[in-house]
Amino acid sequence: MSVVFVADEGVADSGFYASYQVMSLSERGCSPEQSACSTGECLHHDWFCDGWKDCADGSDEQNCSNSTYPSFTSSCEPIQVEMCQGLSYNLTSFPNIWLSIADQREAAYVLRQYSVLMELDCFKPLRQLVCALFVPQCSVQGGVLQPCSSVCSAAEHQCARDLELFGLSWPFNCRLLPDSHDPKQCSMP
């Protein structure tokens, strides 16, 4: 097995944590401090009902009671950030794990710095992009959708020159976003 980790100038945190386990397909028994996933994979007891799906099939988080950790699922909520109201979507979900933003109040605080750009001709596509990044669209499948790379590229094309007038370079790497036009894969606000 080969695992390749490629890092970019990520927006959430630096570094990463990985763990691995070697399993023999012929030996499916778990040690006394482990429990088995539905797939037969053995994990430490502490990894069961901890709010994170560690088994490939998520069976470690099924039928949990008295869990000391909240489930890492969030539901859709109406957008309350004024700058991001009136887009093609009106529901979001937090926390925003891509940008480490806990809730809409924190997102609104961060987005205030972009309000100074409202006078620019390109503010509409820029607004669509920053809202899709900071107050992402809630997906009907659960979770949130990142903006499509085409949304980012359109905003960059229309705004890069205006930002240069302020001595600012384009702050986003559009290649990091999903290259799709499928509304199930990414958002097109």
Image (cartoon, helix red, strand yellow):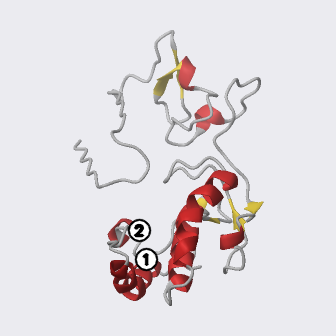
In the rendering, which numbered label is found on residue 152?
1
Label 1: how many residues lie within 10 Å, few (<14), some (14-19) or many (20+)? many
Q: Position of residue 61 (x, y in %)?
A: 64, 34
Q: Residue at x 75, y 63 (%)?
A: 80
Image quadrant where residue 108 sits: bottom right
Is the C terminus in the top left, top right, bottom left or bottom right quadrant? bottom right
67 or 161, which lies in front?
A: 161
Q: Which residue is mark 2?
A: 177
SS at mark 2?
loop
Q: Residue at x 59, y 26 (%)?
A: 48
Amino acid type, label 2: Leu
Is residue 185 something one can see in this rendering? Answer: no
Q: Position of residue 75 (x, y in %)?
A: 73, 53
Numbered-mark total: 2
Label 2: how many residues lie within 10 Å, few (<14), some (14-19) or many (20+)? some
Q: In the rendered view, would you say 83 is above or below 76?
A: below
Q: In the shown orientation, is residue 170 left or right of residue 29?
A: left
Is residue 106 something one can see in this rendering? Answer: yes
21 or 117, which lies in front?
A: 117
